[in-house]
Image: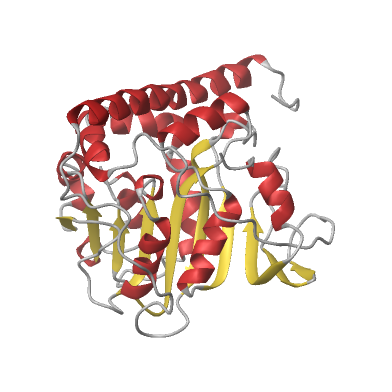
């Protein structure tokens, strides 16, 4: 099991390479004050913020062990999971974990500043994130990619996305040429990648020189029960893991912004399906400098039906828990007086 997110962040605040940045929350994950970007370099920090925080040092913790159990890890299982979840995804998952306000806030660091930008939305699913993208970029310049045809079918039904290119594909093996896109966006997809480092390496490859990647995903919980279900279900990375993956892939000016539903009041101990937005800039044309081995998962291999069913059921149980968590937090927000911690 990975250590808690809080202990990981406390390690992260000790020593970090240049270009590391945080915004949107205090470092213990209790509140979401409006801070600017914090860039760490060497043993000190260069702070641009509207409120004062102590001078800290930053370091990276070790990556999560590959042997950690994840019951919806395999792409085949995720495929069938979304075969059913696609029916209610926009009405069940989004209201609790991925609201329009969160989406727009998470996309801000991507700097979608031109209607003519070429954008790829990897793991775009039902197109909910893409709806935020096409507010700033012409739909004809946006490609939605996902491995789930059932999710993509929902995206095709949305009028603002009718001019988008919609294709099935694998986040770890993108069907785009090198130096293709101005922006790479991926929201709520990394948690299903068997090898996140490979997916982020692909993000680097397909971007043009100076292009920016923006990956939005969950955060590792600290509450024991949430951590148990998170670790048995899918990948909830620690914040410093996101940073490390981006930097290893070759990205520069890497920054992390914390996001969350308003009714969580900044509480992060239960984990968030969408908990942070991480960005990085491609500093040189061509492929990523990171050399990487063969894929960790071969989807062509036959699956044991009993094992498949067991993993699917256990994963669905964990997913149900994380559907209930935002309901619990919403109720607490209604009961606990404003201004008090929940």
Which of these two is toward me, 147 or 142? 147
Instruction: Give the image location of residue 272, x and y in percent.
Output: 52, 37
**Which residue is pictured at 35% across the width and 45% down the height?**
192
Q: Which of the 4 image quarters holds residue 173?
A: bottom left
Q: Which quarter of the image is occupied by the C terminus?
A: top right
Q: Is residue 256 above or below residue 208?
A: above
Residue located farthest toward the bottom when viewing the structure as drawn: 285
Q: Nearer the viewer, residue 265 or 9?
A: 9
Quadrant housing residue 196: bottom left
Query: How far across and down, in percent of the image, does residue 326 sit?
Result: 50, 25
The residue lying at 63 percent from left, 29 percent from top is 223
Residue 147's spot in the image, x, y percent? 21, 49
Q: Is residue 33 visible?
A: no
Residue 231 located left or right of residue 16? left
State the quadrant of the N terminus: top right
Left or right: where does residue 159 sit relative to residue 279?
A: left
Image position of 179 with respect to 311: above or below: below
């Amino acid at each position: 099991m990975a250590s808690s997110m809080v202990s990981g962040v406390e390690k992260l605040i000790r020593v970090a390479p240049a270009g590391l940045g945080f915004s949107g929350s205090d470092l213990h994950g209790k509140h979401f004050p409006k801070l600017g970007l914090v860039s760490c370099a060497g043993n000190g920090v260069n702070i641009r913020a509207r409120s004062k925080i102590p001078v800290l040092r930053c370091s990276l913790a070790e990556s999560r062990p590959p042997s950690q159990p994840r019951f919806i890890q395999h792409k085949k299982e995720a495929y069938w999971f979304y075969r059913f979840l696609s029916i209610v995804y926009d009405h069940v998952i989004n209201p609790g974990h991925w609201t329009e306000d969160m989406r727009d806030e998470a996309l801000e660091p991507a700097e979608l500043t031109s209607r003519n930008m070429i954008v790829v939305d990897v793991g775009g699913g039902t197109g909910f994130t893409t709806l935020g993208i096409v507010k700033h970029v012409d739909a004809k310049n946006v490609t939605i990619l996902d491995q789930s045809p059932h999710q993509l079918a929902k995206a095709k039904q949305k009028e603002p996305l009718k001019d988008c290119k919609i294709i099935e594909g694998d986040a770890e093996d993108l069907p785009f040429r090198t130096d293709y896109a101005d922006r790479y966006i991926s929201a709520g997809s990394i948690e299903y990648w068997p090898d996140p480092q490979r997916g982020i390496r692909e993000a680097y490859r397909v971007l043009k020189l100076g292009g920016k990647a923006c990956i939005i995903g969950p955060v590792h919980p600290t509450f024991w029960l949430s951590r148990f279900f998170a670790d048995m279900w899918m990948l909830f990375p620690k914040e410093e893991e996101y940073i490390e993956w981006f930097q290893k892939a070759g990205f520069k000016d890497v920054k992390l912004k914390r996001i969350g539903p308003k009714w969580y009041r900044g509480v992060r101990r239960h984990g968030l399906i969408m908990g942070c937005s991480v960005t990085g800039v491609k500093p040189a044309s061509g492929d990523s400098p990171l050399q990487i081995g063969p894929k960790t998962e071969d989807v062509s291999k036959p699956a044991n039906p009993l094992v498949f069913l067991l993993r699917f059921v256990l994963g669905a149980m964990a997913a149900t828990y994380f559907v209930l968590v935002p309901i619990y937090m919403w109720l607490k927000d209604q009961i606990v007086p404003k201004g008090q911690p929940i």
